[in-house]
Image: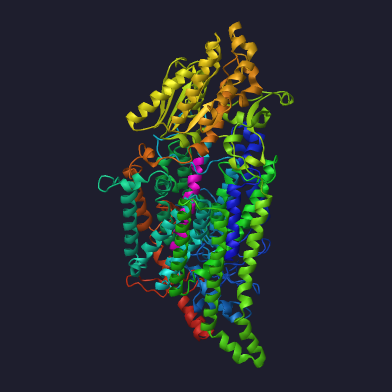
């Protein structure tokens, strides 16, 4: 299993660094047309298709029975069928349960289930319930049926003098309000059929996983988080991506759902676990959960060199928060008010840490100095969801009350049930609508999400469980996928990256997506099974000492290997031979360690002695000892593994093609025609443009887009379109200087458009053409310095270098270009060419002296016919400019820079569109800018943390104390009003005189839970009469009946 785990990690490394065909997005003309924007129509279409298909083929009962089978009545006593008699009394009969069918089980008359992803079988019946069910299977005894009939008859004759206003109104309006159906037996419930059961939680996770994959296929950009309003995006134009940000906001709700389920699931385990002793909180279980959450993520981060699984850290934090809260003073966990006071203390802690600005009281430099990257991202994401896990904990501890209230409503008259549930439904639905039309539409949604993001979660839970039919069934396909939600989250980072989808089928993006999704799901299932096996083997939950020893050994071993890797990297000793040697040696050591531990456990368990004693053949025992000590058996597996590793390395070495440097192939591309009718739906949705082109004219319409050539030798470069937000994040806090002629100025304007100034270069742009310009976007600065001739560029470069020394800050990127105007102004006499060569030589020297990353922009293609004078057509023809390009290359200009942007590569095919022979429309210059953006991957791979500290807000400034106080009030309502839905459930009490308030249902709901857990709180006076409402008779009397009291005597006592 360890070897298989390593093989999976190795394959993921290959996919990340050596993808089969590069990025799939570059192969899709649809994605090229939409410039990698999010497609709402395609996302919703595929999501509806997948969920609809799953509903049709796998909508099934939670208990696995066929849907066509009649639902067995929920209680062991079965609902009585009333028939009117002459005397006016009811004649009751008991329906017999089918032989072999599972009896309904639960906490008792009013208990709730605890079927969650942590434990689904935590509910077990009492001895009386089991014995009672056994008796009910023998319903041929008429005397016992008569006794039960007498009991139910007595209870039915007890009239309730109080009449609800709903009943009075129905009678007044002449509606049928049948007394015999007004009160029915409260249904008992299985854990798998209760509110938010294990099947529902898995179904929920499966839906989110499927939505995640489809979202990424449509370039949703799920990981983009605007850290603050000041940091971007800089454009406030609502017409640009006007609806894409809504789905980006919904991804944050998906994360809130995961964390809500985390708090709910672990709290349910600790609170309702049968043991509820120290065994539930032991260190070995904590290590097991931490291993399960972080094992795959940690090794994937070490293999790929990227710590991008922030959700695993947040889930770990939520689990530890739940564990510590439940572990500290666990003796009061079943005290009605002290336990909730403890949870209120947790809410106060969350408010102080996340919603109050502590930067004045404590030194905030810890987060501030390491703000860029993973530390700041963790802080930001944890702030976005800091109330989610707590709300899940409140929901878990109030679940039995919500379950009992729901089932009591379903036992009442159908009109009462409909009106009471409808009131709660309307309030939650109204809150959901307000959230949709309000905070969800905002671009600064991060401000409100920590406080209002729980609304859609609670609304979904109530609507999903509004009736018994919804609770008792689930979509099996989504539930199966939900088991691997953690692995799907981890692997989707490698299957669907910013570079695009992993490409297996070039030219068929949808078929490729289907194949990648299937492979991802199979890989997730494999990784899930491997991690479970490794967890049970390496972190044995039932052996505390061994669990701690193994965890310490694993952590130490990984730390040693990581340190060794860092040392080799710093010493520049990383090579295939070094890695191969270390891998083989470590593999042999790990194998030997595992074998030694297995033999030690085998001898310590006594199985070896039993084997010898049970063997009658002494020769067999001797052979067994010989095989055990055989050296060949010990050496064979490591030797085979070594040979296999060497064979794989040889195949990889001889089969792989040499890869060209990315700087050589970045300019290799061409313009391709794209069908504009592919985006017809998008144009109608976003721009209300209908019938803008006839379908018959689509083949004749020409829409050109820049695309890189497909070449296996540069597939590792992953050239693709970079959208506005990615560019803004890449250049955030940077200083970019552009020096050159008007063509370089066109690049400067293109940069500004991608940074959010969409009017740059348009008719309304008032920036002088032949002058310097400076534009700032947040903390990102762009400077353009007018330098039409080579000598001007040399002068500007020297001034830039001196100013950098004076300000103690050099530019992060310098782009220079020119040469076209030199040919016009410096080629008049015969001495000019020699002087010009000297100037170009000085230019090359100046370029080498620049300490920042340097890009040279060669002159674009010239449209000779469009030049506006005879002198220009003579001196600046394409043939003469090509000679100038060759001279710059010969004199070392192109070799003095880090990257060369080849102007003719993206302008030659569209040279006829140059209106004056030199300048090109903005879409063409944007293609050159895109080439530069791709080159930034190796020119500026990471951002400087010192630069990022300039604009990041202080820790604590993201919180809003007033909204935090609102959440404190909400927490008080949920805790001390005993309501899963934070007070909304109290609306149900308005429609009936039955006891439906969550506060009044506490004793009844938790009675059998405390009995099952063998807990008797001193202040709790459990009312046994209420807890027996399932059966229509007192449970104590049923116990006496089964304990030996004769049935006739019981009948006489009840009848008397």
For residue 242, side relative to residue 803 (left or right) = right
| Residue 324 on image: x %, y % | 37, 63
Q: How many marks?
A: 0
Q: Nearer the viewer, residue 663 or 525?
A: 663
443 in relation to 471, above or below? above
Residue nearer the viewer, 877 or 949: 877
Evaluate whether residue 167 shows in this view: no
Magenta segment's dominant SS is helix
Q: Residue furthest left?
A: 361
Residue 453 location in percent, x, y? 44, 46
* Left or right placement of residue 655 versus residue 359 in this view: right
Q: Is residue 120 above or below residue 811?
A: below
Q: Is residue 607 magenta?
A: no
- Residue 823 in sight in this render: yes
Residue at image location 39% in from the left, 74% down from the top: 1015
Whether the magenta-drawn stretch holds residue 263 is answered as: yes
Q: Nearer the viewer, residue 433 or 69?
A: 433
For the N terminus, give its image quadrant: bottom right
**Residue at 66% across, 42% down:** 712
Residue interval drawn in magenta: 248-267
| Left-right relation of 327 to 662 | left
- How is the rendered protein coloured? rainbow
Q: Residue 473's image quarter?
A: bottom right
Instruction: Specify whether 249 is left or right of 137.
Output: left
User: What residue is shown at x 45% (from left), y 35% (from top)?
Assistant: 443
The quadrant where residue 359 appears: top left
Q: Is residue 361 above or below residue 792?
A: below
Residue occupying the far top of the picture: 870
What percent of the width, then of the height, locates residue 931? Answer: 56, 31
Whole-percent x, y for residue 238 in the image: 49, 29
Q: Please tell me whether residue 430 is drawn above or below residue 837 in the rendered image.
A: below
């Amino acid at each position: 299993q360890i070897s298989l785990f390593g093989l999976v990690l190795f394959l993921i490394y290959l996919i990340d660094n050596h993808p089969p065909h590069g990025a799939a997005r570059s192969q899709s003309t649809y994605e090229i047309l939409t410039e990698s924007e999010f497609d709402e129509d395609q996302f919703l279409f595929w999501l509806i298709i997948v969920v609809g298909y799953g509903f049709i083929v796998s909508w099934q009962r939670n208990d696995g029975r066929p849907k066509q089978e009649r639902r067995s009545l929920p209680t062991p006593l079965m609902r009585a069928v009333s028939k009117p008699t002459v005397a006016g009394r009811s004649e009751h009969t008991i329906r017999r349960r089918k032989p072999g069918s599972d009896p309904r089980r639960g906490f008792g008359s009013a208990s709730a289930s605890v079927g969650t992803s942590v434990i689904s079988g935590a509910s077990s019946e009492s001895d009386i319930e089991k014995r009672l069910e056994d008796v009910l299977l023998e319903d041929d005894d008429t005397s016992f049926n008569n006794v039960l009939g007498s009991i139910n008859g007595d209870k039915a004759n007890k009239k309730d003098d109080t009449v609800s206003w709903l009943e009075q109104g129905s009678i007044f309006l002449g509606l049928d309000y049948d007394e015999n159906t007004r009160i029915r037996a409260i249904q008992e419930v299985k854990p798998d059929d209760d509110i938010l059961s294990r099947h529902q939680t898995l179904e929920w996770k499966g839906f989110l996983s499927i939505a995640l994959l489809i979202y990424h296929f449509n370039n949703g950009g799920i990981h983009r988080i605007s850290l603050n309003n000041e940091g971007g995006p800089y454009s406030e134009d609502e017409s640009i991506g006007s609806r894409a940000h809504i789905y980006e906001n919904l991804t944050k709700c998906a994360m809130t759902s995961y964390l809500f389920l985390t708090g709910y699931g672990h709290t349910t385990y600790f609170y309702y676990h049968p043991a509820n002793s120290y065994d539930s909180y032991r260190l070995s279980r904590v290590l097991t959960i931490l291993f399960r959450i972080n094992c795959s993520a940690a090794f994937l981060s070490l293999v790929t060199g990227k710590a991008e699984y922030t959700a695993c850290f947040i889930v770990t934090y939520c689990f530890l928060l739940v564990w510590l809260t439940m572990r500290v003073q666990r003796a009061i966990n079943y005290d009605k008010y002290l336990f909730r006071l403890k949870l209120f203390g947790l809410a106060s802690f969350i408010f102080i840490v996340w919603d109050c600005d502590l930067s004045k009281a404590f030194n905030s430099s810890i987060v501030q100095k390491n703000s860029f990257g993973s530390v700041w991202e963790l802080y930001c994401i944890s702030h976005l969801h800091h109330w989610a896990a707590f709300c899940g904990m409140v929901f878990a501890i109030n679940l039995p009350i919500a379950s009992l209230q729901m089932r009591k409503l379903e036992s009442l008259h159908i009109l009462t049930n409909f009106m009471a549930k409808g009131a709660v439904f309307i309030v939650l639905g109204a809150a959901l609508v307000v959230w949709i039309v309000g905070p969800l539409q905002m671009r600064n949604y991060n401000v409100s999400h920590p406080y209002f993001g729980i609304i859609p979660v609670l609304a979904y839970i109530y609507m999903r469980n509004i009736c018994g039919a919804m609770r008792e069934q689930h979509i099996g396909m989504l539930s199966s996928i939900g088991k691997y939600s953690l692995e799907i989250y981890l692997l989707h980072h490698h299957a669907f990256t910013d570079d695009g989808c992993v490409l297996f089928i070039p030219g068929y993006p949808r078929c490729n997506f289907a194949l990648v999704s299937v492979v991802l799901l199979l890989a997730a299932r494999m990784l899930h099974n491997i991690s479970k096996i490794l967890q049970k083997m390496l972190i044995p939950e039932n052996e505390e000492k061994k669990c701690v020893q193994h965890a310490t050994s694993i952590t130490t071993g990984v730390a040693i290997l990581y340190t060794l890797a860092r040392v080799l990297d710093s010493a520049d000793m990383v090579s295939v031979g070094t890695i191969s040697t270390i891998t083989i040696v470590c593999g042999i050591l790990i194998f030997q360690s595992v074998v030694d531990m297995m033999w030690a456990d085998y001898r310590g368990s006594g199985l070896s002695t039993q084997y010898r004693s049970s063997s009658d053949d002494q020769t067999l025992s001797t052979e067994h000892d010989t095989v055990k000590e055989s050296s060949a058996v010990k050496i064979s597996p490591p030797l085979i593994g070594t040979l296999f590793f060497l064979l794989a390395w040889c195949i990889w070495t001889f089969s792989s093609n040499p890869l060209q440097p990315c700087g050589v192939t970045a300019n290799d591309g061409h313009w391709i025609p794209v069908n504009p009718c592919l985006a017809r739906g998008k144009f109608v949705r976003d721009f209300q443009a209908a019938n803008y082109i006839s379908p018959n004219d689509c083949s004749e319409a020409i829409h050109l887009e820049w695309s890189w050539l497909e070449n296996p030798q540069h597939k590792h470069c992953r050239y693709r379109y970079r959208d506005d937000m990615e560019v803004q994040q890449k250049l955030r806090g940077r200083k970019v200087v552009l020096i050159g002629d008007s063509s370089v100025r066109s690049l400067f304007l293109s940069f500004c458009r991608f940074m959010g100034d969409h009017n740059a270069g348009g008719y309304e742009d008032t920036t002088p053409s032949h002058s310097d310009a400076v534009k700032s976007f947040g903390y990102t600065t762009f400077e353009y310095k007018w330098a039409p001739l080579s000598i001007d560029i040399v002068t500007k470069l020297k001034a830039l270098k001196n100013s950098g020394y004076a300000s103690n800050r050099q530019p992060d990127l310098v782009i220079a270009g020119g040469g076209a105007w030199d040919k016009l102004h410096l080629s008049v006499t015969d001495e000019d060419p020699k002087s010009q060569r000297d100037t170009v030589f000085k230019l090359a020297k100046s370029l080498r002296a620049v300490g920042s990353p340097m890009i040279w922009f060669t002159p674009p293609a010239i449209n000779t016919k469009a030049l506006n004078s005879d002198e220009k057509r003579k001196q600046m023809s394409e043939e003469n400019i090509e000679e100038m390009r060759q001279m710059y290359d010969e004199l070392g200009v192109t070799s003095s820079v880090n990257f060369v942007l080849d102007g003719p590569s993206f302008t030659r095919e569209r040279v006829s569109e140059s209106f004056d022979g030199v300048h090109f429309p903005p879409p063409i210059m944007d293609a050159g800018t895109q080439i530069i953006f791709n080159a930034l991957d190796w020119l500026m791979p990471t951002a400087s943390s010192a630069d990022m500290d300039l604009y990041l807000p202080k820790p604590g400034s993201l919180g809003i104390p007033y909204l935090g106080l609102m959440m404190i009030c909400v927490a008080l309502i949920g805790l001390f009003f005993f309501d899963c839905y934070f007070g909304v459930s109290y609306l149900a009490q308005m429609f009936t005189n039955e006891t439906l308030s969550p506060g009044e249902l506490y004793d009844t709901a938790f009675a059998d839970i405390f009995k099952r857990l063998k807990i008797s709180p001193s202040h709790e006076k459990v009312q046994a009469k209420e807890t027996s409402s399932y059966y229509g008779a007192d449970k104590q009397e049923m116990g006496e009946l089964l304990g030996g009291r004769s049935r006739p005597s019981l009948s006489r006592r009840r009848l008397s």
